[in-house]
Amino acid sequence: MKVLLDTCAVSDYNKPLKYPALVAFVDSLPDEALFVSVLTLGEIVKGIDMLPQGLKKDTLQAWYAGLLAAYSDRILPVDPETAEVWGRITSACAARNLDLPAVDGLIAATALQHGLAVLTRNEKHFRQTGAVVVNPWSA
């Protein structure tokens, strides 16, 4: 199984004592089966930038640098094909009066475009896109 890690998965993996089921699941997969979206990187940077200067911010900046190095060849962009998939997903959701935040829709489109499942605890937004969802938090 190959998975695209949603932002919550990347963040929560950094908290192994709080989320042992997630950590065990991710650790059971080979590195080459784990991918992240450029959008997840953007959400992480936003969260770090919003913190006041201090040890927590410095620690997270160092963690983020390590994340970039670890996933350097497994960071997926939003390319024209992915944008087209996103357009179809969002129009289908709008036709059914379903709320789909843009970032979640783009992450789902990235997963669909690359044949990946989405690893997330946010099942509601991702299931409505047709993406395969894996939620080890509920295991």
Image (cartoon, rainbow, N blue to C red):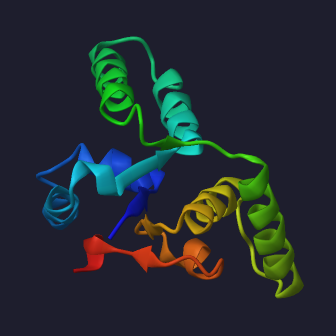
Q: Nearer the viewer, residue 9 or 79?
A: 79
Identify the residue at the far bottom of this view: 96
Q: Can you say whether 120 is above or below 98 in the image? A: above
**Residue shown at 36% from the left, 47% from the top:** 10
Q: Quadrant of the C terminus?
A: bottom left
Q: Nearer the viewer, residue 37 or 80?
A: 80
| Residue 26 x %, y % | 22, 59
Q: Nearer the viewer, residue 15 or 1?
A: 1
Q: Can you say whether 124 is above or below 68 in the image? A: below
Q: Can you say whether 107 is above or below 139 in the image? A: above
| Residue 54 x %, y % | 33, 12
| Residue 90 x %, y % | 80, 70
* Displayed quadrant of residue 30: bottom left
* Displayed quadrant of residue 97: bottom right
Q: Is residue 101 left or right of residue 46?
A: right
| Residue 119 x %, y % | 40, 65
